[in-house]
């Protein structure tokens, strides 16, 4: 696999909005082909890579799921020489004005998100965050040219270039959840050179930001015995309450709540402590808001855990992540799988040992 940082830059520079993941899927597939035994694409576009285990058949299976789709925009209509827009996924419209974008019409067109002057915005919206319905995308073409090159329903991706900050931090769009794709790829690379008894299904899911359809269908189709959802969580930053966010660059989080199987939590916790991989417990009292919510209830139910990488400025074009945390996540995944005994499912009990002494 290419150098971690360069691979991450490549992933976040590729379009791949929720429901339109093709461009980034090709990049991931190329990386996975070198570290898996086979790669396939599901009927709705999720990428599935298999690393066969060394145990006797039929082997137990673990599914590592990380969504590859990103948030973005869609052309909702025309407004003279500009385009009206709507969102794909939970876009934070407060930061949109002035952002550079790419309109994926009959050809890719550079554009920018424009905010009308305050005196032209309806009363009550001019002195606060402007709703998306009043924002426009300007591609520098005439109304006639726009209609020839752009159709309603065409997607619009962010065009912010990746920005290295300090020694370990990268900023850019789509780090949710391409950062986790890199962590999963690092785990596959590690396991490619190690013996592991279980079959490993690595899945880059589609549509997590909108429907979780990729996780639902892949879990149902592959029927894994265990599942891990790798995603991002809120990192500490300006305005982020410390009790709801986690330090950037200081480790990953292990989810705890009804979506998470206690025995899996205990095992990941134990391995993280042994390897001195820093982590925090992330309370998830209801749903996790990740693919894990779909994985856990697929078929007759799959024991699942959520592992997250702290991310600052989530759902904006300038998300920020620590490369060190990505590497830590990949290492923890690989170590867990390398240690999985064939009879693990026979010893799996729903027991709450979260509060055991460290």
Image (tube, rainbow, N blue to C red):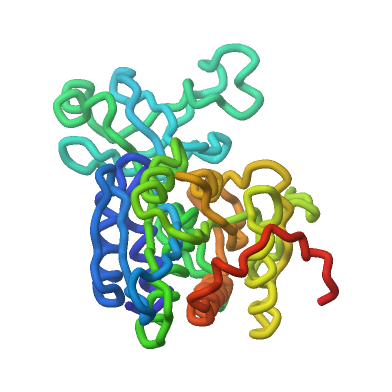
Quarter containing the N terminus: bottom left
State the quadrant of the C terminus.
Answer: bottom right
In terms of depth relative to the viewer, which is nearer, 337 or 65?
337
Kindly identify the residue that appears in the image at 51 percent across and 24 percent down: 117
- Relative to residue 304, is residue 88 depicted above or below? above
Give the total number of marks visible in the rendering: 0
Place residue 222 in its image quadrant.
bottom left
Res 349 quadrant in image: bottom right
Q: Which residue does the image show at 52% across and 48% down from the upper left?
A: 301
322 up-or-down from 22: above or below:
below
Q: Residue at the location (69% across, 69% down)? A: 266
Residue drawn where x is 44% and y is 68% of the image: 184
Location of residue 126 in the rendering, given as x and y in whole percent from the top left corner: 61, 21
Q: Is residue 326 above or below residue 287?
A: below
Q: Is residue 336 left or right of residue 196?
A: right
Q: Position of residue 124 (x, y in %)?
A: 65, 15
Whether residue 253 appears in this view of the structure is no
Q: Nearer the viewer, residue 36 or 179?
A: 36
């Amino acid at each position: 696999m290419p150098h971690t940082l360069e691979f991450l830059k490549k992933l976040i520079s590729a379009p791949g909005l929720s429901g339109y993941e093709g461009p980034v899927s090709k990049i991931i597939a190329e990386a996975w082909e070198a570290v898996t035994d086979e790669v396939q694409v599901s009927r709705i576009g999720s990428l599935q890579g298999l690393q066969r285990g060394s145990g006797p058949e039929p082997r137990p299976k673990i599914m590592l799921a990380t969504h590859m789709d990103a948030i973005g925009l869609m052309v909702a209509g025309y407004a003279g020489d500009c385009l009206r827009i709507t969102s794909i996924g939970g876009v934070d419209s407060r930061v949109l004005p002035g952002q550079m974008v790419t309109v994926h019409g009959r050809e890719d067109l550079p554009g920018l998100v424009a905010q009308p002057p305050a005196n032209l915005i309806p009363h009550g919206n001019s002195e606060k965050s402007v709703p998306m319905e009043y924002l426009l995308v300007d591609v520098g073409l005439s109304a006639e040219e726009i209609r020839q090159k752009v159709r309603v329903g065409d997607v619009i991706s962010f065009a912010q270039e990746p920005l290295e900050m300090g020694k370990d931090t990268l900023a850019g769009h789509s780090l949710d959840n391409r950062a986790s794709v890199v962590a999963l790829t690092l785990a596959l690379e590690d396991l490619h050179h190690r013996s592991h008894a279980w079959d490993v299904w690595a899945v880059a899911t589609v549509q997590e930001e909108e429907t979780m359809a990729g996780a639902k269908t892949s879990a149902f189709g592959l029927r894994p015995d265990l599942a891990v959802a790798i995603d991002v969580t809120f990192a500490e930053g300006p305005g982020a309450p410390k009790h709801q966010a986690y330090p950037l660059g200081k480790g990953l989080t292990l989810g705890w709540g009804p979506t998470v199987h206690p025995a899996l939590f205990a095992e990941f916790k134990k391995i993280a402590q042994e390897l001195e991989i820093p982590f925090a417990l992330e309370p998830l009292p209801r749903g996790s808001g990740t693919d894990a919510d779909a994985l856990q209830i697929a078929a007759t139910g799959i024991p699942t855990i959520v592992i997250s990488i702290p991310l600052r400025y989530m759902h904006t074009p300038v998300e920020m992540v620590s490369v060190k945390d990505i590497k830590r996540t990949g290492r923890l995944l690989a170590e867990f799988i390398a240690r999985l005994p064939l009879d693990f499912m026979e010893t799996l009990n729903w027991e709450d040992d979260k509060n055991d002494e460290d």
